[in-house]
Image (cartoon, rainbow, N blue to C red):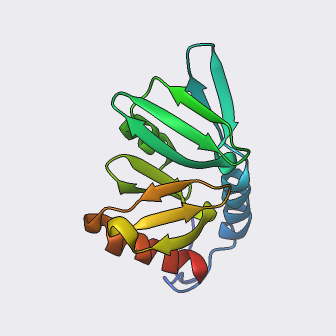
């Protein structure tokens, strides 16, 4: 039992001694390369999330574009994949597009908004998602 007179007062602004090692472990786990299972006709591709530039919806199927130029059509909706990729640097920029913000190289105003990606890909930006896109890009550049 701890004597209240001898107990150290912990305030909200004061870092806890145990938070350092725990914080380091969480950071290491987040850095670990997450592989996403992508089922298609021939089997399952386990793609590293860092290699995916963007995803394009085609009905209940989604085309996954990789940085090396490879494309895979998978039998999962873009909404399902969006859930798997949340918190990993991806943003839904259009009803049909989910982009990896790490690969965004340029924004063009043509056609209502077009996002150019490293590796030669592109995605269209919906007017309703412009504010969210620019805020996310601003956060990434800081």
Of 122 and 77, the residue lying toward us: 122
Q: Is residue 110 visible?
A: yes
Image coordinates for residue 57, horizontal then vertical, percent: 40, 39
Image coordinates for residue 1, horizontal then vertical, percent: 57, 63
Image coordinates for residue 78, horizontal then vertical, percent: 40, 38
| Residue closest to the far left | 128
Q: Looking at the image, which residue is at 58% across and 53% down?
A: 121
Q: Looking at the image, which residue is at 42% across and 76% down?
A: 134
Above or below, 106 against 70 in this view is below
**Does 71 sit left or right of 95 as displayed?**
right
Q: Looking at the image, which residue is at 54% across and 83% down?
A: 9
Q: Is residue 7 visible?
A: no
Image coordinates for residue 22, horizontal then vertical, percent: 68, 60
Of 16 and 105, the residue lying toward us: 105
Which quadrant would the C terminus be assigned to in this image? bottom right
Above or below, 118 against 39 in this view is below
């Amino acid at each position: 039992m701890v004597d209240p007179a001898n107990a150290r007062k912990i305030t909200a602004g004061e870092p806890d001694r145990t938070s350092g090692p725990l914080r380091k472990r969480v950071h290491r786990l987040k850095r670990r390369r997450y592989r996403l299972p992508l089922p298609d006709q021939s089997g399952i591709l386990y793609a590293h999330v860092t290699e995916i530039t963007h995803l394009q919806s085609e009905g209940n199927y989604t085309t996954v574009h990789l940085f090396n130029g490879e494309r895979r059509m998978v039998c999962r909706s873009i909404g399902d994949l969006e859930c798997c990729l949340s918190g990993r640097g991806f943003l839904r920029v259009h009803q049909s597009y989910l982009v990896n913000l790490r690969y965004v190289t340029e924004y063009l105003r043509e056609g209502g908004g077009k996002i150019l990606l490293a590796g030669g890909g592109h995605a269209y930006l919906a007017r309703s998602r412009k504010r969210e896109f620019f805020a996310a890009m601003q956060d990434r550049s800081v």
